[in-house]
Amino acid sequence: LSVARALASDQGSYRCVVSEWIGEQGSWQEIQEKAVEVATVLIQPTVLRAAVARSVSVAEGKELDLTCNITTDRADDVRPEVTWYFSRSPDSILPGSPVLARLDRDSLVHSSPHIAMSHADARSYHLLVRDVSKENSGYYFCHVALWAPGHNRSWHKVAEARSAPASVDVTWLEPDYQVYLNASKVPEFSDDLTELECRIVDVKSSEASVRFAVSWYYRVNRRSDDVVASELLAVMNGDWTLKYGDRSKQRAQDGDFIFSKEHTDTFSFRIQRTTEEDRGNYYCVVSAWTRQRNDSWVKSKDVFSKPVTIFWASEDSVLVVKARQPKPFFAAGNTFEMTCKVSSQNIKSPRYSVLITAEKPVGDLSSPNETKYIISLDQDSVVKLENWTDASRADGVVLEKVQEDEFRYRMYQTQVSDAGLYRCMVTAWSPVRGSLWREAATGLSNPIEIDFQTAGPVFNASVHSDTPSVIRGDLIKLFCIITVEGAALDPDDMAFDVSWFAVHSFGLDKAPVLLSSLDRKGIVTTAERDGKSELSLERVSVLEFLLQVHGSEDQDFGNYYCSVTPWVKSPTGSWQKEAEIYSKPIFVTVKMDVLNAFKYPLLIGVGLSTVIGLLSCLIGYCSSHWCCKKEVQETRRERRRLMSMEMD
């Protein structure tokens, strides 16, 4: 008996049994049998050992190379099967541990993309793990099985062994760097630009798989020891996504907060318009992000910068305007000149806009508490006429910039009506983001008074009418009579602007309505009216003006008065406009003519009643004559003479 490729199952006691058979009559019969113990066979087990280095340390991102060395006493045709396992603990059971790589008996390798397995010879097998991370720290096992060929091309496992756990420690060399924050642009006033730079310096052991990101924080500057929480302004993750905090979200969308990365090691934060609420402490946090095998990024380290304080003294803006008059004494018709000097404090790079205002002097009841805007000059030196309505002197006022802080106002051919208090209203503007401006402060100068001390004539106006009460349809005549007191004037040296007004009510509780006006050049202007009556205005004498209402109606009743603006020729030949005067109102009534009012209705009524009566009589006659006529037939009686009965 020869047993080739003995297996462990072939171990045991062998005996030989011999039987003797004879053949009779065509059949066989056993006549004797004898058994003998031949031998007891002991199969020696295959010696197999697997060994791996007990402790290995490798840096993160490097390659892990482990070798499984096999020792066996078999030299015949056996094939090994090598499997690498990984476990977090050294006493893990193999079936429950994940398989890293396997080399089967046909020398085929089964592994993941970042793990390779190879063998230098029949007794040494290598495991190579690329780009290790902290997740690869743990214990590695090597399991070896020997397979021997059997009959019919089958294989039998003859031995297996597991190595002792190999402790692998993945060390991470975290980036070593410092963070410094400095203010490249510090604000001195509100609305100034603030720029902070967060710089990474002294970078050591920085791998390609490390990425730096930044977070910006703000903290209120308190003098006390109270703990103040920091407010997140913006944070940048490892994938370069930027997220805003609640404090900066709206202002970042408006473009007031700008977060950027200038260079690989520099991050910047800009505040386009710094407000007083932005004063405080700012600091940045630079985070190191490490890329994982699945291309994700994990934060590995944070480094804080020292805070930078943004602060300026919040002093109030001061603007002082002083006005002066180079020529304090002048007469009507001359040129009035006023200069305004401006000085400011705590205003950054100011530019000034100027507005010239005029007020009536104290005691003038024509327009009390009325401030008139004459001319303005903005911060870009653009001149604009405000409420200057004197068409005859359209170019009579000039406002110019003498210096950066000095302005001059001139008014040519001054009139008596120009008397009043003149001021300069100056507004200081600070530049904001290039071409934009912000109003910083406003100041009003001291008043400069124009007062004409003249002994000229005094004008009065009154209204007279011979027909204050008229019948509807009659002519209403109203005279505006001007009287002159004081110095006598040549009629050629006087001219008047006359306007007529009416208040159509018994009292003066309604707004006056302009009826007609006649200027000093003789041009008449009549306002549009809804009634059928017509107006005419004429100058009947030097000092009398006549207003006539033709075809008066009921709505023409009310209070009538005239306003007169005298013009006096000065010795220099220029016309001076005097103060406007008003007459007392006169009440005009429009009555109704009773006879004329009822004449036509009575005639029409009598005529209509007569016609209707005659028509009724005619209708009655016709009806009785043709429609209601009947024929009456009378039965004639026979006339018989009565005879006496004796004759019958």
Image (cartoon, helix red, strand yellow):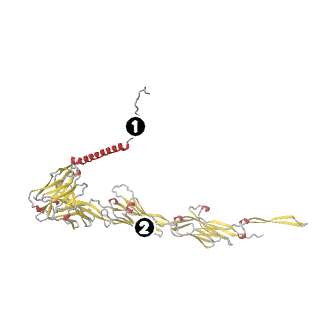
Left or right side of 456 for 93: right
For the residues labelled 2 and 1, the Cα–Cα distance comes to 155 Å
Disc 1: which residue: 634
Image quadrant for the N terminus? bottom right
Three-letter residue code for mark 1? Glu
444 and 358: which one is in front?
358
- Residue at disc 2, secondary structure: strand
SS at mark 1 in the image: loop
> Is residue 449 visible in the rendered structure shown here?
no
Residue at figure coordinates x 25%, y 60% from the top left: 442
In the image: residue 575, left or right of residue 350: left
- Residue 76 lies, in percent from the top left, at 69, 72
Residue that carries the numbered disc 2 in the rendered image: 177
Mark 2 vs mark 1: in front: 1
Near-viewer residue (147 or 513): 513
Q: Are marks 2 and 1 in contact (CB under 8 Å)?
A: no
Q: Position of residue 383 (x, y in %)?
A: 24, 66
Residue 525 x/y as whole percent: 21, 60
